[in-house]
Structures are given as structure tokens and as C-alpha cells.
């Protein structure tokens, strides 16, 4: 439903449609899936990760992962045929559903790679949504990261100040 695009200038983008932003869960799911395509292509060309693309394909096409994906897509035969015929899609679906907590990966190396990517993507997707942006602003204020931009006060300082005012 979304798309991963590798432009001729080397820029990599994930395309989401306006309707995807109506639900943070849907946009997050699509970003997870499409980013797995970006990861896969990067692994194929970067010598530092030689063998990792093959490892992810091996895990994604294993009986355990395929059985989990088949259960998720039990009513979508076309999707099942698609990821069974295309190893990169199997990796993308595996990552998408692992990141959503719907699929278990036992392979430790694949799990480590996916955990690092998910942490980064969660930050990106949260920044795209009003709720995520609001939470980040409030967290930043609470932790004092906005103090230099607005004032030297943090939420904790204001709370202590309010307690002092009430008790006086």
C-alpha cells in the first residue's frame, strides 16, 4: 500500500498516502514494511553487511516464520503467494509483523538487526504524528532538554515552585 523508492540520485524515500496518516498504527505498519525493503537493498550493496541479506532471507523463508506469516495472512491467498515467491517481500513482511509484536523471531542475529532498526523507525514515525510529537515535546520539557530554548525552568522546577508557593 505504501512504497519504497530509491531515486536515481541515491535518495531513498518511503511514500505514504494521506489516508495512512489517519491511523498511527497503519502508518507505522507501512513504514516498518517499506523500510525493510530499504534495509534489504542496503545489505546487498554494503560490504560491511556481507551475508546479512542472505541470513534474513534464510530466516524469513524458514518454516517457523512462514507458518507465522501464513497464520497472519490466512484469509489473503494473494499476499501469501507474493511473499512465498519473493524472498525480499518475505523479509519485509517478517520485519513488519515482528516490529508490531505479531511474529516471533528466534534467530539472535536477525533479532539484533531488527531491534536496532525498530528503535530508529519508532522515533521517526512518532515524529510524524501529532500524538508522538506531543509526547516528545512533553518528555523533552520534563527532562529539561528545552530549557535552553525557552527558559532555565523544567517541569520539575515548576512543580517544586508550585509546592513551595502552596506551602507558604
Image: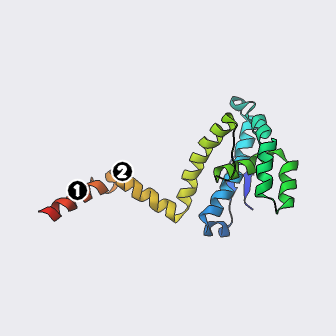
Query: Which residue is labeled 1 in the image?
Result: 160
How many C-alpha atoms fall within 10 Å of the one at disc 2: few (<14), some, or many (≥20)?
Answer: few
Q: Nearer the viewer, residue 106 or 134?
A: 106
Marks 1 and 2, how far apart at CA: 14 Å
* Horizontal and vertical percent position of residue 109: 67, 34
Please, which colouring scheme is shown? rainbow
Where, quadrant-wise, is the N terminus in this rendering?
bottom right
Residue situated furthest left in the rendering: 168
Q: Nearer the viewer, residue 10 or 121?
A: 121
* Horizontal and vertical percent position of residue 155: 31, 57
How many C-alpha atoms fall within 10 Å of the one at disc 1: few (<14), some, or many (≥20)?
Answer: few
Where, quadrant-wise, is the C terminus in this rendering?
bottom left
Label 1 vs 2, first from the N-terminus: 2
Task: Look at the image and tell me whether residue 154 can be seen.
Answer: no
- Going by the image, does 15 lie left or right of 84? left
- Going by the image, does 60 lie left or right of 136? right
Question: In this rendering, is residue 68 above or below 2?
Answer: above
Judged by depth in the image, the label closer to the viewer, 1 or 2, is 1
Query: Which residue is labeled 2 in the image?
Result: 143
Q: Secondary structure at mark 2?
A: loop
Q: Residue sitting at 14 percent across and 62 percent down?
A: 167
* Horizontal and vertical percent position of residue 137: 42, 58
Q: Secondary structure at mark 1?
A: helix
Amino acid at each position: 500500500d505504501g512504497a519504497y523508492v530509491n531515486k536515481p540520485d541515491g535518495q531513498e524515500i518511503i511514500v505514504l498516502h494521506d489516508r495512512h496518516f489517519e491511523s498511527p498504527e497503519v502508518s507505522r505498519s507501512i513504514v516498518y514494511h517499506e523500510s525493510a525493503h530499504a534495509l534489504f537493498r542496503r545489505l546487498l550493496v554494503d560490504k560491511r553487511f556481507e551475508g546479512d541479506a542472505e541470513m534474513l532471507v534464510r530466516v524469513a523463508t524458514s518454516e517457523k516464520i512462514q507458518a507465522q506469516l501464513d497464520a497472519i495472512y490466512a484469509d489473503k491467498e494473494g499476499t501469501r503467494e507474493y511473499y512465498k515467491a519473493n524472498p525480499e517481500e518475505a523479509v519485509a513482511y517478517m520485519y513488519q509483523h515482528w516490529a508490531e509484536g505479531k511474529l516471533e523471531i528466534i534467530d539472535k542475529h536477525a533479532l539484533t538487526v531488527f531491534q536496532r532498526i525498530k528503535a530508529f523507525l519508532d522515533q521517526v514515525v512518532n515524529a510524524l504524528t501529532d500524538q508522538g510529537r506531543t509526547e516528545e515535546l512533553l518528555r523533552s520539557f520534563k527532562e529539561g532538554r528545552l530549557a535552553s530554548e525557552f527558559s532555565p525552568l523544567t517541569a520539575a522546577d515548576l512543580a517544586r515552585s508550585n509546592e513551595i508557593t502552596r506551602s507558604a
